[in-house]
Image (cartoon, rainbow, N blue to C red):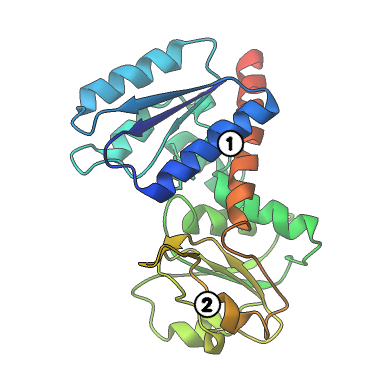
Amino acid sequence: MAAQIIDGKALSLIIQVYVRNKQKACEKAGFESWLHKLDANSTQADLLNLISKLNQDPKVHGILVQLPLPKHLNTDLILDAVTALKDVDGFGPENLGLLTSGRPRLLPCTPHGVLVMLQRYKIPVAGKHVVVLGRSTIVGKPMGLILLQNGIDATVTICHSKTSNLKEITRQADILVAAIGKPCFVTADMVKPGAVVIDVGINRLEDGKLVGDVDYEQVLPLCGAITPVPGGVGPMTITMLLHNTLLAAKLQQKS
Ligand code: GUN
């Protein structure tokens, strides 16, 4: 059902765990999955060739290129090559464009998982001020777009490494989404008491401990709710990947 492509040598431990967990989730859900582990020296043409084969393979309903790719590969060109109806990460221009124009189809898994989590925990979003820390194409930007959709109706601010007066902005958040990739970056003084804090980060410290982008111990006593790392957003990302793969299979049947 789903094919994962990764660059073999450059795989960090965290990425290896991501990939393994996605394989396990596929097995558990009864999805067949194939891992294509590429050599770190593989060329752009090698990867484009593989994507082209998977695009044409009727047994494959979803294609996921595990990021980050090595520097000698052009990530945009690689992601553009994945056929839009198999783009289960939702990172390609067609799916991101549809989301931007208010016609969401295959949504990026992590921000979609955050939305579903907020909805399942009945956390009010409409009219609330959501501050997103980070502007990546994987999380920050689509997170903002998803929350801005008609019917979801959040007021969204997206902050990034160049934002001035960051703390003043984050302190206004009813919901704070941290996706900045810096361990324990969000401290207690950046959070409004009672705010809901969603931690998208996953960082490994030198002692091997996994931590998020939020200083969990500091923020826990003052916030209204908070997601742990590991175990909060991560499993939601994988769940939404399975959701997208099923949706992609249905869309392909119709097309
Ligand atoms: N690297 C970090 N997060 C992700 C993700 O959600 N999808 C892919 N393909 N690569 C990632």
Question: Closer to us: mark 2 or mark 1?
Answer: 2
Looking at the image, which residue is at 54% across and 80% down? Answer: 170
Split into 4 quadrants, where in the image is the N terminus? top right
The residue that appears at 74% across and 55% down in the rendered structure is 151
| Side of 3 relative to 50 (left or right) | right
Q: Which residue is mark 1?
A: 106
The percent coordinates of residue 55 (x first, y second) are 44, 17
Q: Residue furthest right?
A: 122
Residue 221 shows up from this direction: yes
Locate the C terminus by quadrant: top right
Dot 1 falls on a residue whose secondary structure is: loop
Across and down, in percent, residue 203 comes to: 43, 62
Q: Looking at this view, is 250 or 187 the one in front?
A: 187
Are dots 2 and 1 in contact, CB under 8 Å? no
Q: Please state which amino acid type lies under the numbered disc 1.
A: Leu
> Across the whole image, how many numbered discs are drawn on residues?
2
Ligand 1 is located in which of the four quadrants? top left
Q: Secondary structure at mark 2?
A: loop
Q: Is residue 24 above or below residue 249?
A: below
Disc 1 crowd rating (10 Å Cα; few below 14, some 14-19, many 20+) is: many
Q: Quadrant of residue 41?
A: top left
Between 201 and 132, the one nearer to me in the picture: 201
Q: Position of residue 246 (x, y in %)?
A: 66, 27
Q: Quadrant of residue 50?
A: top left
Is the residue indicated by label 2 positioned so its CB lies within 8 Å of ligand 1?
no
Q: Amino acid at mark 2?
A: Asp
Is residue 104 visible in this depiction of the protein? no
- Among numbered discs 2 and 1, the one appearing first in the sequence: 1
Marks 2 and 1, how far apart at CA:
32 Å
Name the residue nearer the viewer: 252 or 63.
63
Residue 223 in the image: x percent, y percent?
Answer: 68, 80
Q: For mark 2, what is the residue?
A: 215
